[in-house]
Image (tube, helix red, strand yellow):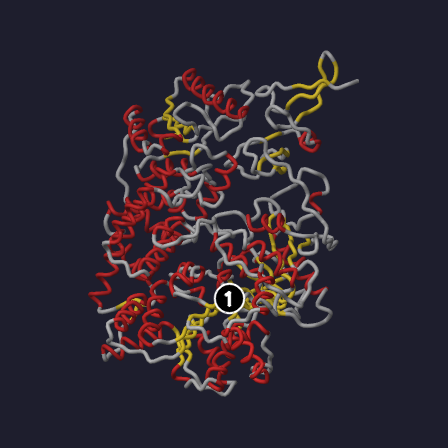
């Protein structure tokens, strides 16, 4: 369609198109040498186009800074526009300074500004004094927590309860056990008790609960002052019990009460399992009840349906009353102090990050305190809740969260007022109002904005009012595929639907990129465009690189079932890094190379601490990795966010696992944020997907993905599914790099279907087959030979094993006696 449209335009050119072509021809000499580089045709079109509202969509590595520099040069030297009549805005001081230097080399001394500087200048001129601007909302949140929440026992308890609630994904009844585990893998199921104890005691205790619902119960017991044991061995287990050692979910020691939490609905069904395992689960419930009755032990019960119906608190209280369980007062302030002293638990930091992001977005829209009631009403409708989440539970959590944020917001505004301070969004909104009220009259002819994909609503209003007041033309450059700053207020809809916000638009796509190979461009584009909300663009490059994405798998604690699979993956992430560097060094041909190692968060660098070949040092403001075997490689570590706009010869991406602290991060993409934005994306992990795209495209040559062999990031899985053989290859420990090598077919768990079966070792040294989702999935099989043969039972999905009976040899299910399937073998 694009080529056909271009062909038609060439046959029937509009006056605007004629003008553009004439200008490109007339000023060819200028465009052939902009700071020693020649503009391509798309860049030249963008520069000479004089439409009132221009959007230049520039792909990664396409030379957007060069395009902006050329635009300024053209306006000043050709169109006679004075530099002071151009408002040139970048998003950071560093970017603004770099832009200033680039343009200064062209012989033009222009003031490159930031939104902060522009807004501050307006307020200073109108108010005749410079305002005091707050830099960090999180400082006020810490102060609020310490002064208001943690100083009050009741509020401290409510806060701890909210923390427990917010981090638990309670799934809908229809969610399969595998999907439920996948949801919960993105959460940290550390209980409040273990958070307070610290990492050392947690290691000794090793209290790991299996589900979000169990975390809730454990936290409730803890906050009620009830001492409990998690999965303590039941002392009266039956000797001939074919099941594994019976361990009730909880044991309330002081009251001699056992507590089981059953994952069933109101109809006593467990639809998360297939038919066979559901029946097995229901029979297990019956067996447990009978065992307690036989041994005269007290069994309290709660059920999953009580969470979904918001009846769990009443059910807990009823069990307390029935079995004489007495609550005890505890110091919630002491608990919080202990948790803060440990300072290693992501629940607090994740929660605070979500609050700060929410308030930043809320402020960027200029909402006052009254708007909270509208958002709370929207939350009650539950339309923002993704598939697989229980609607009632998520609504409950969201309303409690909004109540907390509302309290903090009121405190924050009052503190700013009493201190005579304003925050960044205040400043931007106030500056925008001064323009619309005629108190400040901008006199610009052109407004040029770099990295427009990072625009927030408050910044948009400042730009719009500047344009309306001055009659200036707008020239915006950016890439929606690289919009990654929602946590600071950016709203991608302002870029995607540019025309809706600014009126008519002239869009120019800069399609030629100079950094990445065509092979990397193609697969990364297919990856990002899985989100249909992103703008479609066809990027091209003259560079070619065989298999620019290279995956290095590592096993970690995973021991494969099939012999030979262990030759496929590195032993750990440290060895995976060595393999990637070896491949880089081998292909360097003696040239010095820059290697950029990227993590989702700063702490990801700690994954490499066990590698004896490396040392990590701070050199000149950079985190440098020195490798004994490859001293000529300049290896630098950064987070993906801080790598934006940078490039390196080679890139290595860490921490590509499916987990709470992995990639994607679920906290950043919490659906509650959609209650603020006007046209929120519905695609799961949309912003995290763009962040991964940024990581992929920092390289001039290859990007190496260090991924666990099992439980790998959904983004690595997507790359595996989207790839062509010439785009992606796997590096294996024996250095047999083969573009066509395939990841071995791994055996899935017969119960949860999502986990991968691997070999583990019991305390007695005996090996057995277990699910990678342990302890959330309890599947175990002691017959390694049957697992390696991998003949599955058609009834339950477990392994069939060869047995001898009175009628000869047959195949029987290793799940016997729960499953009695058999198959006769021909003689």
Residue ranking furthest to the top:
806
Residue at 65% from the left image edge and 40% from the top image edge: 746
Answer with left or right where residue 667 lies relative to residue 381.
right
In terms of depth relative to the viewer, which is nearer, 352 or 323?
Answer: 352
The residue lying furthest to the front in this view is 12
The answer to which image quadrant residue 760 occupies is top right
Place of residue 462 in the rendered image (x, y in percent of width and height, measured from the top left)? 33, 69
Q: Nearer the viewer, residue 448 or 758?
A: 448
Of 137 and 244, which appears nearest the observer? 137
* Neighbourhood count class around disc 1 (C-alpha, 10 Å): few under 14, some 14–19, many 20 upward: many
Instruction: Say what secondary structure mark 1 lies in.
Output: strand
Inspect this view and state whether residue 605 appears: no
- Identity of the residue furthest to the left in this view: 418
At 28% from the left and 34% from the top, the residue drawn is 327
Residue 705 position within the rendered picture, expressed as x and y whole percent measured from the top left: 61, 55
**Residue 587 or 342: which is nearer the viewer?**
587
- The location of residue 439, given as percent across then percent down, is 24, 76
Residue 175 against residue 724 in the figure, above or below: above
Report which residue position mark 1 lands on: 57
Can residue 267 be seen here? The reply is: yes
Measured from the top left, where is residue 819 in percent x and y? Answer: 59, 21
Instruction: State whether residue 499 is above or below residue 562.
Output: below
Q: Residue at x 75, y 15 (%)?
A: 808
Residue 592 in the image: above or below residue 564: below
Task: Please count the marks in the image.
Answer: 1
Image quarter in which the N terminus is found: bottom right
Q: Quadrant of residue 417?
A: bottom left
Q: Is residue 53 left or right of residue 811?
A: left
User: Which part of the image, by quadrant, shows the C terminus?
Assistant: top right
């Amino acid at each position: 369609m694009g080529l056909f449209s271009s062909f038609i335009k060439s046959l029937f050119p509009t006056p605007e198109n004629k003008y553009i072509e004439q200008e490109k021809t007339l000023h060819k000499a200028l465009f052939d040498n902009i700071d020693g580089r020649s503009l391509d045709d798309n860049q030249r079109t963008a520069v000479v186009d004089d439409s009132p509202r221009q959007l230049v969509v520039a792909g990664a590595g396409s030379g957007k800074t060069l395009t902006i520099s050329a635009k300024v040069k053209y306006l000043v030297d050709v169109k006679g526009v004075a530099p002071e009549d151009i408002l040139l805005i970048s998003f950071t001081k560093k970017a603004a300074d770099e832009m200033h230097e680039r343009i200064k080399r062209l012989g033009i001394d222009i003031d490159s500004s930031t939104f902060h500087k522009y807004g501050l200048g307006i307020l200073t001129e109108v108010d005749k004094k410079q305002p005091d601007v707050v830099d960090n909302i999180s400082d006020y949140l810490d102060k609020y927590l310490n002064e208001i929440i943690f100083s009050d026992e009741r509020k401290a308890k409510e806060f701890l309860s909210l923390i427990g609630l917010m981090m638990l994904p309670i799934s809908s009844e229809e969610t399969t056990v595998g999907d439920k585990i996948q949801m919960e893998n993105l959460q940290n199921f550390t209980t409040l008790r273990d958070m307070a104890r610290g990492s050392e005691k947690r290691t000794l205790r090793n209290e790991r609960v299996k589900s979000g619902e169990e975390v809730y119960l454990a936290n409730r017991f803890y906050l009620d002052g009830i001492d409990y044991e998690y999965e303590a061995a039941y002392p009266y287990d039956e000797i001939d019990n074919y099941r594994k050692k019976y361990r009730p979910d909880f044991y309330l020691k002081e009251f001699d009460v056992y507590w089981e939490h059953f994952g069933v609905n109101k109809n006593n069904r467990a639809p998360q399992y297939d038919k066979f395992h559901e029946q097995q689960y229901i029979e297990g419930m019956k067996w447990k009840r009978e065992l307690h009755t036989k041994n005269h032990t007290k069994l309290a019960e709660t059920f999953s349906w009580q969470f979904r119906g918001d009846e769990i608190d009443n059910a807990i209280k009823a069990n307390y009353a029935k079995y004489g369980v007495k609550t005890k007062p505890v110091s919630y302030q002491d608990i919080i102090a202990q948790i803060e002293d440990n300072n290693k638990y992501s629940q607090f930091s994740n929660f605070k990050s979500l609050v700060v992001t929410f308030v930043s977005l809320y402020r960027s829209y200029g909402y006052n305190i009254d708007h909270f009631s509208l958002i709370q009403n929207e939350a009650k409708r539950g339309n923002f809740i993704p598939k697989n989440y229980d609607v009632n539970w998520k609504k409950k959590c969201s309303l409690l969260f909004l109540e907390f944020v509302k309290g903090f917001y009121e405190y924050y505004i009052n503190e700013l007022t009493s201190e005579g301070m304003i925050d960044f969004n205040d400043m931007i909104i106030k500056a925008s109002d001064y323009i619309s009220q005629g108190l400040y009259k901008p006199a610009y002819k052109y407004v040029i904005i770099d990295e427009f994909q990072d625009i927030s609503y408050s910044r948009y209003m400042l730009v719009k009012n500047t344009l309306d007041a001055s009659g200036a033309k707008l020239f915006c450059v950016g890439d929606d595929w690289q919009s990654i700053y929602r946590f600071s207020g950016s709203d991608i809809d302002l870029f995607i639907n540019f025309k809706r916000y600014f009126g008519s638009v002239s869009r120019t796509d800069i399609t030629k990129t100079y950094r990445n190979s065509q092979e990397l461009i193609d697969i990364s584009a297919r990856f990002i465009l899985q989100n249909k909300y992103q703008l479609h663009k066809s990027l091209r490059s003259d560079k070619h690189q065989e298999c620019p994405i290279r995956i290095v798998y590592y096993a970690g604690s995973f021991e494969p079932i099939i012999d030979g699979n262990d030759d496929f993956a590195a032993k750990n992430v440290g060895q995976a890094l060595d393999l990637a560097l070896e491949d880089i060094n081998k292909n360097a041909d003696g040239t010095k190379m820059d290697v950029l190692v990227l993590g989702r968060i700063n702490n990801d660098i700690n994954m490499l601490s066990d590698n004896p070949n490396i040392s990590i040092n701070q050199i000149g403001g950079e985190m440098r990795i020195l490798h004994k075997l490859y001293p000529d490689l300049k290896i630098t570590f950064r987070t993906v966010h801080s790598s934006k706009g940078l490039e390196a010869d080679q890139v290595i991406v860490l921490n590509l696992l499916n987990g709470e602290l992995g990639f994607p991060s679920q906290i950043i993409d919490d659906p509650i944020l959609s209650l603020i934005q006007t046209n929120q994306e519905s695609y799961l992990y949309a912003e995290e997907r763009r962040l991964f795209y940024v990581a992929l495209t920092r390289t001039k040559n290859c990007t190496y993905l260090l991924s666990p062999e099992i439980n790998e990031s959904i983004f690595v899985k997507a790359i595996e599914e989207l790839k062509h053989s010439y785009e992606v290859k796997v590096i294996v420990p024996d250095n047999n790099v083969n573009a066509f090598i395939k990841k071995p077919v791994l055996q899935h768990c017969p119960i949860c279907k999502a986990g991968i079966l691997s070999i583990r070792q019991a305390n007695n040294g005996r090996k057995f087959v277990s699910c990678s989702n342990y302890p959330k999935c309890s599947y175990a099989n002691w017959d390694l030979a049957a697992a390696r043969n991998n003949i599955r039972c058609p009834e339950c999905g477990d392994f069939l094993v060869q047995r001898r009976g009175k009628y000869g040899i047959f195949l029987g299910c290793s799940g016997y006696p729960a499953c009695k399937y058999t198959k006769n073998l021909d003689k």
